[in-house]
Image: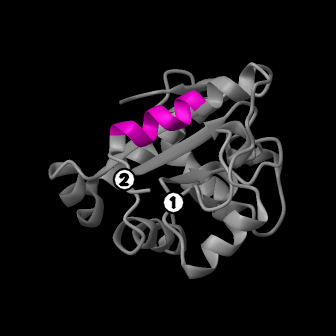
């Protein structure tokens, strides 16, 4: 597709508008599309989203096969593997947009807020990464504020990485944070 960053973002915003008004087109789902993708992929955007089953980005943005490169991890958190996946999308696939998508009622952020209430043996791998974000919030126990702050901080950190910052400087990449409202289906772009 090779869309410019702002065009890619507007395409996602328009797709989300179709989704929230029950006008989804469900593009690029045909046998012909599947066959065309055998030769490779050229997604218009990379979404770093949460693993939550209520937030399927292809549906939320009304996109189809080959349109979005997806990186999903609970709490839309960064670690080495996630960062490497995002770098692959930007350097190898040439995506012009990375969108960090937080969402209402995020269980990973909720777990970080309630960290002293126990959890599973490996849950701390998530909560430990979110704890510093909570310190940036005016009200660290406000789940909505924490989710939004988390998405903004992850996007900020990405923009500081050399692979991303060089492309941002030359205008070939945009990295933004967004928030998905479960009830309405609306994606609010938190920064442009």
Vertical comparison of 174 with 141: above or below: below
Residue at horizontal 69%, vertical 46%? 27
As displayed, is residue 129 above or below residue 115?
Answer: below
The magenta segment: 6-14
The quarter of the displayed image where residue 153 is located? top left
Specify whether residue 149 is painted magenta. no
Earlier residue among tags 1 and 2: 1
Q: Position of residue 181 (x, y in %)?
A: 70, 25
Instruction: Give the residue at x 75% y 25%.
Output: 23
Indicate the position of residue 56 as horizontal and vertical percent values: 75, 47
Q: Residue furthest bottom?
A: 39
Give the quadrant of the C terminus. top left
Left or right: where does residue 138 sit relative to residue 128?
A: left
Q: Which residue is pictured at 61% across the width and 39% down the height?
A: 102
- Main SS type for the magenta part? helix
Determine whether, in the image, residue 40 is placed left or right of residue 166: right
Nearer to the camera, 66 or 118:
66
Write the residue at 80% across / 21% down.
Answer: 183
Residue 39 sits in which quadrant? bottom right
Q: Which circle marks residue 96 in the picture?
A: 2
Q: For numbered disc 1, what is the local secondary structure? A: loop
C-alpha distance separating marks 1 and 2: 9 Å
Q: Which residue is mark 1?
A: 43
Place residue 22 in its image quadrant: top right
């Amino acid at each position: 597709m090779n869309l410019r960053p702002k065009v890619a973002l507007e395409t996602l915003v328009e797709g989300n508008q179709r989704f929230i008004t029950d006008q989804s087109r469900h593009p690029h789902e045909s046998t012909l599309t599947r066959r065309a993708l055998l030769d490779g992929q050229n997604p218009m955007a990379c979404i770093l989203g949460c693993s939550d089953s209520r937030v399927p980005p292809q549906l939320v943005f009304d996109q189809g096969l080959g349109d979005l490169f997806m990186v999903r991890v609970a709490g839309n958190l960064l670690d080495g593997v996630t960062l490497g996946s995002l770098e692959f999308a930007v350097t190898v696939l040439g995506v012009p947009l990375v969108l960090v998508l937080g969402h209402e009622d995020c269980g990973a952020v909720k777990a970080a807020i309630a960290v002293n209430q126990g959890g599973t043996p490996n849950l701390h791998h998530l909560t430990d990464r979110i704890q510093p974000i909570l310190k940036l919030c005016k009200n660290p126990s406000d789940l909505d504020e924490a989710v939004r702050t988390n998405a903004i901080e992850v996007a900020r950190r990405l923009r500081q990485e050399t692979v991303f910052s060089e492309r941002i400087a030359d205008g070939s990449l945009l990295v933004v944070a967004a928030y998905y409202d479960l009830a309405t289906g609306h994606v609010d772009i938190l920064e442009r």
